[in-house]
Image (cartoon, coloured by chain):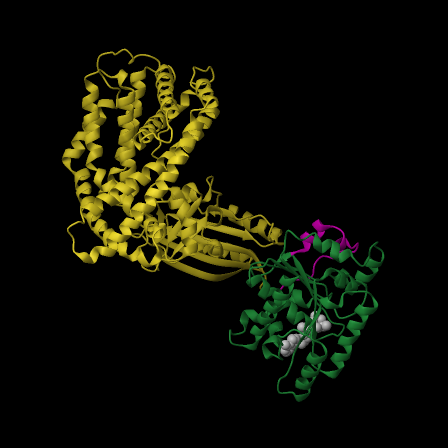
């Protein structure tokens, strides 16, 4: 029946209940028929952000490397698993899996993140049918246990799931009663949490976006210290992933975190003594700059598919030598960065910087350091917005690209200010502001990416100059790419001008005036 | 949701064998399927190891969806439910007679299961009466097993005549050959003749199969225990042919 609700009941079994006793008790009421009985080593796969967990899904890699993907409600149910082929057993990213259905399912969840095992153990699943004398199934029963690899005989979790069959509710109740009498108890947490809990794993969903809750009246310097501390913590969460080169997002988030630290220092500089600011800027800037080249190559390689698709099919392979080139360069550079992050020098520098902020930056008072955070927030947000809309109003068809790029940077600054201070203002209004800003930033971002990509290719082309003639097809395809990007850039420029007009119109100005005020409900 | 009736005026022609195996094939193909055992003998229910339902004297079956749902049992197979035979089904005709719109009652109650099932298969008892007229009104297809003998041919034509005389749509009737013996000359001739005269015959033919007779011992659809190579698989072919026709409508 389609509409019958899934009415599975899960019970955890007490440690002192032996399996034999459990089965014998079942046999007093039912004919117990074992249908399947499997035991295998398995791993639970996740990415750094716990994206599957956040979507209430779980991926398990079996002994034969196949992966089963479940919704929480159907955990361990063979028939509803999305079984993902994993022939070469090395798939980490959604695009590594051979099956396109699996790719489409995983793509929006995993994005650019790699899957890796967060738990390895032994999984035993026994499928039992509880029947009557006629051989009619009355209840489906699944006995699941998980053991640590070192102690395959002492399960650290035993769970029984009983699923009723339509029309046999009486028998189901009987089984529930029996389980209760045996000391079985319903887990208080949802299936995935109770499983992970039993295995001693705590999911730690992560996002680079800070969630700050700075009281409106907090002294501004304390607030800014706390912002910077939070972002340094985020930065450091990404260190291990860069060292192990798990996926490119670690470095990306590492850099985003530093960028937010730098934005906080530069834009909220009035809370610090004047002569400290350039030093702090320099020190964080150095950390970021060290990783520029690797990030450039990463971005370029991630776009491989897209570049190829810009060209006629017959020319696509001509680009491969260039990508091979960059993949080699990336290997070398990623190793260098991995060693750098693992180095004592880096660790000392970041430890030092972190200790400056962790308990509030200590120095002499400044004009702003003791003022209420909300005053600082309003002042800065209004100023940044004003700067954007003033610049936007001057944009027309003849404005140099440079000016558009500089507005993009101001928008990013505004975005970070909103991250830092969102909790001080009316949430609904902040959301509206955020939406307007996002739509503008997206357009400006595409425009900027096209410029950066064009420049990147041009640079590569220039340094090819002295290579032999066999590269002629590569050069031709580069030419094709560069001109495609240029055409797209021209179109995108037009869209930027439209978006800027919207962002700086009277109603948006009004929205900013209304949103960034001292309101009684916030803080 | 579609409704197929496995029906024949004649007894012992393979209606139940077809219902049971088609229902299983349907569920296997991913359809939420309900097999309704309309025969008080309860042969279908027996094959699925389900005992007769509680006696329902007042004919709630035809009036109240809740009561109907309560009688439904999950089979041993995923996606396949059974509404077992009920002894009170013996009194269907009396029950129906006392109701208004007595020929459309079955159609009404079954259409209320739209959300629950993709396909309903009715295993009918052999007769023409008020119950069968309810079946004719409810079904999207009347599947008629025909043993290729001269006598069966006459019974089949009786059914066509009944449809014609009583204003039922003849085109929902789709016969197929059942228990056909390819070594039997008479069978071969009858098949050729009837296919000629009645183009509505389905292409799939169910041969006389020893495995079907063993269904009573196994108490499972023959498709479950017969080997992949055996002719029992022709029930799957038959099911696929039926689905194609129903999908076209
Ligand atoms: N294809 C077949 N090959 C061999 N035997 C068959 C086949 N189909 C049905 N039978 C046997 O013929 C007998 C009657 O079949 P079945 O019960 O399916 O017919 P029916 O039309 O439902 O009968 P009834 O009218 O009594 O309900 C049964 O013993 C069954 O095992
Ligand atoms: Mg029958």
Q: Position of residue A246 (x, y in %)?
A: 27, 45
Nearer the observer, A459 or B52: A459
| Image-based side of B150 in relation to A423, left or right | right
Nearer the observer, A82 or A371: A371
* Residue numbers of the magenta segment: B47-72
Q: Position of residue A417 (x, y in %)?
A: 35, 24
Magenta run includes residue A407: no
Do we see residue A18 in this rendering? no
- Which quarter of the rendered image does ligand 1 occupy? bottom right
| Image-based side of B168 in relation to A250, left or right | right
Do we see residue B162 in this rendering? yes
Q: Name the image quarter holding residue A362.
A: top left
A449 relative to A182, above or below:
above
Magenta run includes residue B68: yes
Q: Position of residue B180 (x, y in %)?
A: 65, 81
Residue at (72, 63) in percent of width and height: B38
Q: Position of residue A267 (x, y in %)?
A: 29, 21
Q: How many marks?
A: 0
Chain letter, colour green:
B
A483 relative to A266, above or below:
below
Residue at (44, 30) in percent of width and height: A435
Nearer the observer, A323 or A111: A323
Q: Residue furthest front?
A: A398
Q: Quadrant of the N terminus of chain B?
A: bottom right
Chain letter, colour yellow:
A
| Image-based side of A359 in relation to B6, left or right | left
B104 relative to A341, above or below:
below
């Amino acid at each position: 029946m389609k509409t019958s609700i899934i009415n599975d009941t899960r019970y955890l079994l007490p440690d002192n209940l032996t399996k034999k006793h459990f089965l014998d008790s079942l046999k007093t009421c039912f004919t117990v028929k074992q249908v399947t009985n499997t035991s295998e080593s398995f791993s639970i796969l996740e990415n750094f952000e716990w994206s599957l967990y956040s979507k209430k899904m779980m991926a398990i890699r079996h002994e034969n490397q196949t992966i089963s993907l479940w919704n929480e409600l159907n955990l361990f149910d063979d028939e509803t698993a999305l079984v993902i082929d994993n022939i070469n057993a090395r798939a980490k990213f959604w695009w590594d899996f051979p099956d396109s259905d699996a790719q489409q399912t995983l793509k929006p969840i995993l994005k650019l993140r790699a899957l890796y095992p967060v738990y390895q153990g032994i999984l035993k699943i026994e499928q039992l049918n509880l029947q009557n004398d006629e051989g009619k199934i009355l209840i489906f029963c699944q006995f699941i246990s998980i053991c640590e690899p070192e102690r395959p005989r002492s399960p650290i979790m035993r769970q029984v799931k009983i699923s009723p069959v339509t029309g046999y509710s009486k028998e189901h109740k009987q089984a529930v009663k029996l389980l209760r009498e045996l000391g079985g108890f319903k887990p208080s947490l949802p299936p995935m949490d109770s499983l992970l809990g039993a295995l001693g794993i705590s999911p730690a969903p992560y996002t680079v976006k800070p969630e700050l809750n700075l009281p409106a009246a907090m002294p501004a310097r304390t607030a800014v210290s706390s912002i910077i501390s939070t972002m340094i913590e985020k930065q450091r969460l990404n260190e291990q992933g860069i060292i192990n080169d798990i996926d490119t997002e670690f470095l990306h988030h590492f850099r985003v975190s530093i960028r937010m630290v730098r934005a906080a220092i530069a834009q909220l500089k009035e809370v610090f003594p004047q002569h400290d600011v350039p030093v702090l800027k320099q020190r964080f800037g150095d950390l970021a700059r060290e990783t520029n080249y690797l990030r450039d190559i990463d971005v370029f390689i991630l776009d491989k598919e897209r570049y190829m698709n810009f060209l006629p099919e017959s020319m696509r392979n001509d680009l491969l030598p260039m990508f091979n080139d960059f993949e080699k360069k990336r290997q070398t550079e990623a190793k260098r960065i991995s060693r750098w992050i693992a180095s004592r020098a880096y660790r000392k520098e970041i430890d030092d910087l972190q200790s400056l902020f962790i308990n509030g930056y200590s120095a002499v008072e400044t004009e702003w350091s003791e003022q209420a955070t909300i005053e600082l927030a309003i002042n800065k947000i209004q100023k940044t917005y004003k700067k954007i809309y003033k610049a936007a109003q001057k944009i027309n068809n003849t404005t140099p690209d440079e000016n558009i790029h500089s507005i993009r940077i101001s928008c990013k600054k505004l975005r970070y200010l909103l991250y830092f201070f969102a909790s001080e203002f009316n949430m609904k209004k902040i959301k509206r502001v955020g939406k307007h800003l996002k739509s503008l930033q997206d357009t400006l971002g595409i425009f900027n990416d096209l410029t950066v990509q064009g420049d990147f290719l041009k640079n590569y082309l220039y340094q090819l100059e002295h290579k032999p003639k066999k590269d002629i097809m590569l050069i031709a395809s580069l030419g094709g790419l560069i001109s495609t990007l240029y055409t797209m850039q021209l179109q995108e420029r037009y869209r930027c001008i439209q978006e800027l007009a919207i962002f700086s119109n009277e109603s948006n100005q009004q929205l900013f005036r209304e949103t960034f005020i001292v309101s009684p409900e916030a803080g | 949701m579609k409704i197929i009736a496995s029906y024949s005026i004649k007894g012992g022609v393979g209606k139940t064998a077809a219902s049971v195996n088609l229902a299983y094939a349907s569920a296997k193909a991913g359809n939420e399927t309900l097999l309704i055992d309309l025969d008080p003998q309860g042969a279908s229910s027996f094959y699925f190891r389900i005992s007769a339902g509680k006696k329902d004297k007042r004919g709630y079956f035809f009036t109240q969806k809740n009561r109907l749902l309560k009688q439904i049992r999950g089979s041993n197979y995923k996606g396949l439910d059974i509404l077992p035979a009920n002894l009170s089904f013996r009194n269907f005709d009396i029950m129906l007679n006392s109701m208004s719109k007595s020929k459309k009652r079955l159609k009404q109650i079954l259409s209320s299961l739209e959300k629950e099932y993709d396909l309903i298969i009715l295993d009918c008892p052999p007769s023409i009466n008020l119950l069968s007229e309810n079946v004719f009104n409810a079904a999207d297809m009347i599947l008629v097993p025909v043993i290729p003998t001269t006598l069966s041919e006459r019974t089949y034509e009786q059914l066509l005549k009944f449809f014609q005389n009583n204003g039922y749509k003849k085109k929902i009737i789709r016969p197929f050959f059942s228990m056909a013996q390819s070594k039997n000359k008479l069978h071969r001739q009858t098949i050729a003749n009837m296919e000629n005269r009645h183009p509505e015959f389905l292409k799939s033919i169910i041969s006389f199969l020893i495995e079907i007779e063993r269904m009573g011992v196994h108490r499972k659809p023959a498709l479950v225990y017969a080997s992949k190579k055996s002719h029992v698989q022709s029930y799957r072919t038959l099911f696929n042919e039926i689905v194609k026709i129903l999908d076209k409508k």
